[in-house]
Amino acid sequence: MKTGFTRERLSQPRVAAANEILRACVHCGFCAPACPTYFLTGDERDSPRGRIWLIRDLLESDGAPSDEAVFHLDRCLECAACMPACPSGVNYAGLIGAAREEIFERAERPIWVRWSRGLLARVLTDAHRARRMIALGRLFGWAAPLLPAKLAAPLRLAARAPRPGNRVGPAPGTYPAQGARKGRVALLAGCVQAAMAPGINAALIRLLNRHGIEAVVVNDAQCCGALDRHLGRGDAARDHARRVIAAVDALAGTDGFDAVLQTSSGCGTTMKDYGTLLPGDAAAARLAALVRDSAEYLAGLDLGWRAGMPSLVAGWIAPCSSANVQGVRDQPRALLAAAGITVAEPADGGRCCGSAGIYNLTEPALAAALGTEKARALAALGPDVIAAGNIGCMVQMAGRSAAPVAHLVELLDWATGGPVPAGLAGGVFDRARQD
């Protein structure tokens, strides 16, 4: 793509980096069929190629972004499905991130939009606030049909969210390995997932400990920065990243960590990109190199499988960011298969389910359409359980799928001697409890 940035604009590191990415695009259009929003709307401006034109025009200008650019760039899921489809290797994720920071800094959004986005950033990046918001949403869920879509979205989301009880754990601290220690890893306490489904990290800790891995849950590190990054709040995202880095470094000790694990794909993708988010920061680059998706790490362990697991068919939802950006595609399927679980994948392939961080709050209509499509595709498989590697995917399917939903690590914990995942009940799951 031909660009026409002024020397002044190119002096800005964000714009200079985007310029290099833009110039790699050859407008071939192979990205469009892979894009979930283009699939729904058929609008070129809702395709990666169309958005790249909008991003170039946005970054070349100095004034407020056009309403057209803001509207269509807001509708991007950041699922990065376009990246594996691109023959030129265009780093679209880097482009949309730069564009959203520019929009945050320069767009003249209505005051209620600025207020609502600021509230989301404040509430969802803290697990305790998020848990209270979910409880409040359930209390007033009856009002959802009376409200505009974007105001009703948090209430509908709260109604579908798991019921975590009174904790946002597991609590920070060290969870020692059973038997001889074979490794040592760090886990973030987390924010939204910790509020909605604390059992996910608890399952991972049990699984790790059972196989000789010491797990350290990091304190003072609620959000990794992913949610603020989705909103274009780059400075806030960098502040979160610095706190995470400091907290992990403080607990590393002389033994250090073999890996920093994530059970939420969007968080893992952001943390693996800390070196880009904080350029020139050696600590950020060092931590980024340690980050692993839980499936990525577990695939390297010699897991011992329990006898008596029921024969299950799991409808697998591949988290977009782990598959498309991190390249973690085969490990989850291989782990489920090794556990004796038959893996079935929907005909829509890797199309996003519509959760995408906070997309189901900022763009509820498109998110709902994609969630319905994904649930329909999964139902056609006749699964016993929907298996996911991300809390957002789980919430999208809860209430839309007749089959129960569980996280990958919950199923693997069960298959290696842990309890039946909390969300599973009836039929084969009850029989398994008796084994």
Image (cartoon, grey):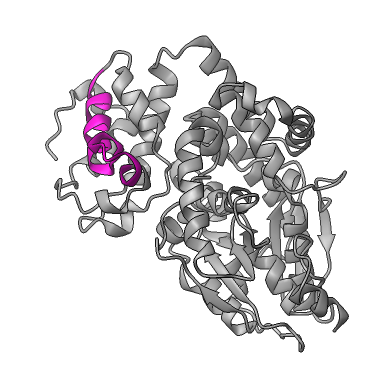
Would you say the magenta stretch is mainly helix, strand or loop?
Answer: helix
Q: Nearer the viewer, residue 320 or 396?
A: 396
Where residue 130 appears, x then y in whole percent? 73, 35
Task: Decide whether residue 58 is among the magenta residues.
Answer: yes
Q: Quadrant of the N terminus?
A: top left
Reply above or below: 78 against 339.
above
Task: Decide whether residue 342 is among the magenta residues.
Answer: no
Count of residue discs: 0
For image coordinates 49% across by 66% down, the residue present is: 380
Q: Is residue 278 visible?
A: no
Q: Nearer the viewer, residue 216 or 398?
A: 398
Reply above or below: 13 against 196.
above
Reply above or below: 384 against 35.
below
Horizontal arrangement in the rendering, residue 377 relative to residue 311 (left or right): left
Reply above or below: 199 against 222.
below
Horizontal arrangement in the rendering, residue 4 relative to residue 20 (left or right): left
Q: Which residues are magenta?
A: 38-61
Where residue 188 appears, x then y in whole percent? 69, 51
Q: Nearer the viewer, residue 44 or 260?
A: 44
Q: Quadrant of the C terminus?
A: bottom right
For image coordinates 72% across by 58% down, the residue present is: 200
